[in-house]
Amino acid sequence: MWHVVCGDNAAEGVTRVVGEELSLQVLRDDLAVGPLADVDQPPCGQRVAFWQATWPASVQPAPDFAAGLSDDVSWLASLATHSEPVTLWHGDSASEQLMLCRVAAAVQHSHLPFFEVPCGTGDSRVAWRRAVAMHAPDELLNLYEPKLVSPARRQHLAAQWKQAVSDNALVRRWFNGSFHGEDYRAIDHALLTACSAQWQPLARPMAEVMGHSDGFFASDFFLFWRARELAKTGRLELSDDAEAYPYTELSVRNPS
């Protein structure tokens, strides 16, 4: 049986539950952010360009986004021809839920047995949500009760994926089983509001935004990128060259 997870941290916990010899597929793309228009169309140029811009220059080596994203498309395209059933682990992150929808779209017209292991609470607000990686292995073991995804649910999930790709929003939040797209203005406003006229470590307002990011997990690299973009337009001021230093070594202030 194939087991599909979102990200390496989730993979570590799931591997400890089902064993080292499992067929494990790790999908690392954070589907909650960035354009999706060509995510299923190699070489995924728009998607690759987004991640290349987001990745901090001070963190090297950078992943080979072009190869990784194209490999995901190839694996998903071949999934319907596999003989092994597929089990997808997901929690309350928008990225995990989009991954669930994407895999459902890949097997929509096949008879491949498709299972899910829900690991969330169903509530994507910060105080309540649970991603797979947030569970200890013993918790995941207790949650390991694969549920067969019905044909009707497959169709619904696949339709959600196709709609998300068509909408091509820049940020997708997940609430009550639905995705809600927006541009970067809300997250930028949150960053600007968390900064003051006084210098403070950049990590502090980033953590403030993370702590109130209902509907999706705002990652540190994503928020660092938004801070760099705001600094380019003069809406934020950084203490040093953001291309040379990690965010943990930078301070920030709001000059307005």
Image: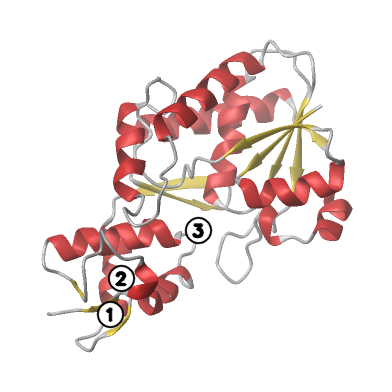
Residue that label 3 marks: 217
Residues at marks 2 and 1 touching, judged by CB atoms closer than 8 Å: yes
Could you tell me which residue is drawn at 63 percent across and 37 percent down? 26
> Mark 2 or mark 3: which comes first in sequence?
2
Q: Amino acid at mark 2?
A: Leu
Residue that label 2 marks: 191
Q: Secondary structure beneath disc 1?
A: loop
Q: Amino acid at mark 1?
A: Cys
Q: Is residue 234 left or right of residue 70?
A: left
In the rendered image, residue 242, in percent from the top left (x then y), is placed at 25, 64
Q: Amino acid at mark 3?
A: Phe
Q: Where 179 sits versus 166, above or below?
A: below
Q: Where 206 sits versus 67, above or below?
A: below
**Residue 17 visible in rendering:** yes
Task: Report the quarter where the N terminus lies.
Answer: top right
Along the line of sight, the residue nearer the viewer: 185 or 122 = 185
Could you tell me which residue is drawn at 64 percent across and 19 percent down? 107
Q: Secondary structure beneath disc 3?
A: loop
Q: Is residue 138 left or right of residue 154?
A: right
